[in-house]
Image (tube, rainbow, N blue to C red):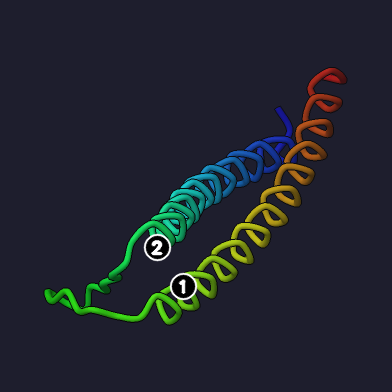
């Protein structure tokens, strides 16, 4: 096998590792997003709202907690979009390299 083909295979393996890392990050952010959605739905059903600060639970206003959760949700969604774009770019690049490797291996 040519040295160039071997390098492309190594590059492809590195891309796959990066994609797997992004997938893990995406799953974490999706989980956070679901937790935020759950918290937002719970706020509407309760009279008193509490916030955990360190090891202490402190009463807080619904409006402030809702505002903070919505800001956090926007941030998480932005991060998800960024990760999805990175994942798409890496998958596209991996597909291109994989095609090149397959062509080179058929020639040999």
Does 82 sit above or below residue 71? above
Residue 97 disc label: none
Please state the horizontal and vertical placement of residue 95, each as a whole percent of the image: 78, 36
**Marks 2/1: CA distance?**
8 Å
Residue placed under numbered mark 2 in the picture = 43
Q: Secondary structure at mark 1?
A: helix
Residue at left 51%, top 50%? 30
- In this view, the residue in front, 57 or 54, is 57
Residue at left 30%, top 80%? 60
Q: Is residue 99 left or right of residue 20?
A: right
Q: Is residue 108 left or right of residue 37?
A: right
**Quarter of the image containing the N terminus?**
top right
Q: Residue furthest front?
A: 47
Say whether disc 2 or disc 1 marks the residue closer to the N-terminus. Answer: 2
Please state the horizontal and vertical placement of residue 108, each as a whole percent of the image: 82, 19
Circle 1: is it few (<14), some (14-19), or many (20+) Cα within 10 Å? some
Residue placed under numbered mark 1 in the picture = 66
Please state the horizontal and vertical placement of residue 28, each as a whole percent of the image: 44, 51
Residue at left 17%, top 74%? 57
- In this view, the residue in front, 44 or 25, is 44
């Amino acid at each position: 096998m040519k040295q160039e083909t071997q390098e492309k295979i190594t590059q492809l393996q590195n891309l796959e590792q990066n994609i797997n890392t992004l997938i893990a990050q995406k799953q974490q952010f999706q989980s956070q997003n679901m937790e935020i959605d759950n918290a937002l739905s719970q706020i509407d059903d309760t009279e008193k709202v509490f916030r955990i600060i360190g090891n202490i639970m402190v009463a807080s206003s619904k409006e402030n907690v809702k505002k903070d959760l919505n800001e956090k949700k926007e941030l998480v969604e932005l991060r998800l979009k960024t990760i999805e774009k990175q994942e798409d770019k890496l998958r596209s690049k991996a597909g291109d390299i994989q095609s090149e490797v397959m062509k080179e291996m058929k020639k040999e």
